[in-house]
Structure formats: C-alpha cells, structure tokens
Amino acid sequence: MAEIITKLRTARLPFGFRAAGISSGIKENGAKDLGIVISDFPTVSAATFTTNRIKAAPVRLSQRHLRRGDIRALIVNSGNANACNGKQGFNDAKLMTQFAASSLGLEARQIFVCSTGIIGYPLPIEKVRRATPKIVEKLRVSGWKDFSRSIMTSDKVNKVCSVKTLIGGKEITITGTAKGSGMIAPNMATMLAFFVTDAAISETDLRENTKLVVNETFNCISVDGDMSTNDTVVVLANGAAKNRRPKKGSKDLNHFTEALKNVMLDLAKQLVRDGEGASKFIRIEVEGASSDLDAKKVARAVAESSLVKCSWNGSDPNWGRVIDAVGYSGARVDENKVDIYFGPLAAAINGVVAPTPIGKLKAQVSKKEFTLRINLNIGKGVHRVFTSDLSEEYVAYNRLEYALKIQGR
C-alpha cells in the first residue's frame, strides 16, 4: 500500500533545524527583512537559480558555495535585491555570509545568501552587520513563520507548507516557504523558495530530484512573464530522521520525490494566487501537441499574453486572443484542428467558434479559478501552466519604485 503524504495544518520545522526573522531596518516601514535558517547537523544541499544572464551577487556567490557543498545555513534579506551593484554588491554578499558565519560558528562557504527587493540600489550592509548577532539569538524551532515573513516583498500573505510521510520506515518532514508576487515567469519563476527536511538522502539524489520537481512546479507558473535576477530555490536535508537512505530507483526515493513535489506545488500555486493585482487563478492545460516542448511553448505564450490576461480580468471569454497566442508561440499548429475550452465548455472547435452561448462561457471566465484547455489535435505532447489575470492594480503597483526610492535617500 502506498505511503500517505499528510499536509500539516501548521508549518513546522523538521528535527534539527532552527529559524528566525527580524527587522534590520532595510525596510523603512519596520517590517521583518532579515532571516536565517540553520541546521544543527550536517546537511546535503540542492539549489536551482535564475536562468537570467544578469544574476544578482547573492546568486553568483551561492552558486559557488553549492559546488563546494557542506551547506549548514542560509541568510536572506528582503527590501533590496543587491543586484547590479558591481563589485560592491558581490563584496556585500560575501560580507553577509561572513557576518552569519561569525555569529553561528561556521565558515562563510557553508552559508547560502539570498536577497530580494529593488534592483540597482546599494544594500545597506551596515544594517545587516548590526542585526546579524541579534537574529542569531532569536533562532528557534518555532521560528519558521517569522523567517517566512522576513523574506516577503510585495507579497500580501506569507506562504508556508509542511508535509510528513514515511521514508525507509521513519517519519520525515518537509517544510517550505516561498516569496513572490510579481516578476514571475517560468524557467525559475521570480521568487525565493526554501525547503528543509530531516530525511536522509544522498546529495546526488537530492539534487536530481530537486531539479526534476522544480521543473514540474515553479517552472510551470507565470504571473507577468518577467524573470528576475535573484530567483533561487534551496533544499537542505540533514538526515536527522535517521531513515534508511533511499536507493536510486527505489519506491522510497520516488515517494520522497512525491512528498517534495507536494510541498513545492502547493507553494507554486500560492505564488500565483498572491500575484500582484491578481484576482483570478487560471490553469492552462495544453494537449495534442506534436511534442511536450511545443505544448510548453503554447502554454507559455497564452499565459504571458497581456491581451489574454486582460480579457480574463474582465471576465471576457475572448478565445480569439488565445488562438492568436497559440499561432505565434513557435509551436507546430494546424489552425483547422485547434479546440479551446473554458472549463468544460467549448469556445472554439477546429479553429472556429463553437455553438456554446456566450453567457455560459462568460460564467466560466467569471470564476475566481477556472481551467483553459487547448487541444492542438496533432500529437501527444502535453504541458500545464498556472497563471493569473492582469489588472489595473498590477499597473498601479508597478508604476513607481526606483524613482521613489532614490528620491527618498
């Protein structure tokens, strides 16, 4: 009988982990903006990073630390991305790891560093230096919620999730948190996400499975089609549950992968639902493509079309905008075979309007959550994307940021 994966009602840290989040003063409103997570035991680690060619200093430094392994902690700030700050930015990222290492009794190379916030504005590193010893004093097994709040930027709600299950005859816990509301697109959605587990697993298997699950979750969401300079997903496993380490290809390893996917998918959906100005959550399912890659091209083109997303905001079942995006997606398409459905109702069959009454289609698009299904009817390729609508609130929020920050110096 398959093992049961249970979602916990309250996110909790797995055995051997502690976390904290405080205000260091980076955010002028006094909100939490500095977080630390540490494992009291050695860990194996995995991470994926933005594919943007412009990478923030913390991303470049954490990539170096990942190659060396033996990661024990991570330090994260919000309110400032520490991106495009030249040599000083890289030095500041290194200083953050040094501050944390000094207070935690570790080496700087054992620490991941992440930042999120405004791009191109110097990080107030002195505030981080002063706050680091204070946050270390607050590290607690109950500190996950404070940590999750410390990484928020434009998020309206903090996003957390925990599951427990059995691996190798022992109960293990996987807990995660993610931040992100805007600048979210596939190929490392614009966000930070952190996961900790007390499961025992080899580093090779953890890294392979993390990459696989990220592709099926965080790389299948889009809010506005913009990719950030700071995207990072980190997974730390300390083996404190003392389960038998799963063997490659085993049921236990597959079960661990499913548990990790459960947490990541939950958080990926939370990111879309909390998208900047978003009022609707849309699941795009593409099938019948000539390949999975072509299905992905179609799903992304539709999910990132401003015209399509605006029509969803207005509850307008404008399938013409959808098929237009299908056509320019770069996928192989036969116009005379494309079917489009809003929920269970056909809007277009074989590339022309279906007889479904417009009022019924509008009722589907008026829902807070609905599915858009596109069948190209030329192959077996499939892909799905979770996305949101585009609203006036999104524009209002993103009209000004940098200029206001600079003027406020």
Image: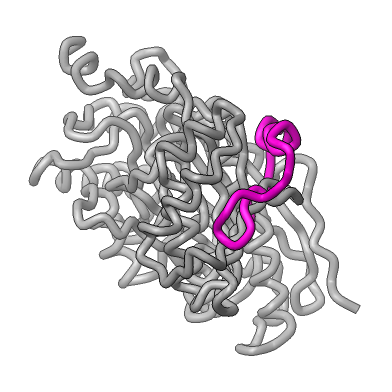
Image quadrant in which you'd find residue 110: bottom left
Up-down relation of residue 383 to residue 35 (above or below): below
Q: Which one is nearer the viewer's eye here, 199 or 356?
A: 356
**Could you say where residue 232 lies in the image, as x and y percent from the top left?**
39, 53
The stretch of residues the image draws in magenta is 347-373
- Residue sitting farthest toward the top: 408
Judge whether residue 177 can be spotted in this image: yes
Classify residue 279 as left or right of residue 191: right
- Residue sitting farthest toward the right: 1
Q: Which one is nearer the viewer's eye here, 368 or 398?
A: 368
Q: Is residue 355 magenta?
A: yes
> What residue appears at the point 60 percent right and 64 percent down from the top-left corner?
375
> What residue appears at the point 54 percent right and 25 percent down from the top-left corner?
156
**Could you say where residue 276 lies in the image, as x and y percent from the top left?**
47, 29
Image quadrant in which you'd find residue 365: top right
**Could you say where residue 148 lies in the image, as x and y percent from the top left?**
54, 37
Q: Is residue 222 magenta?
A: no
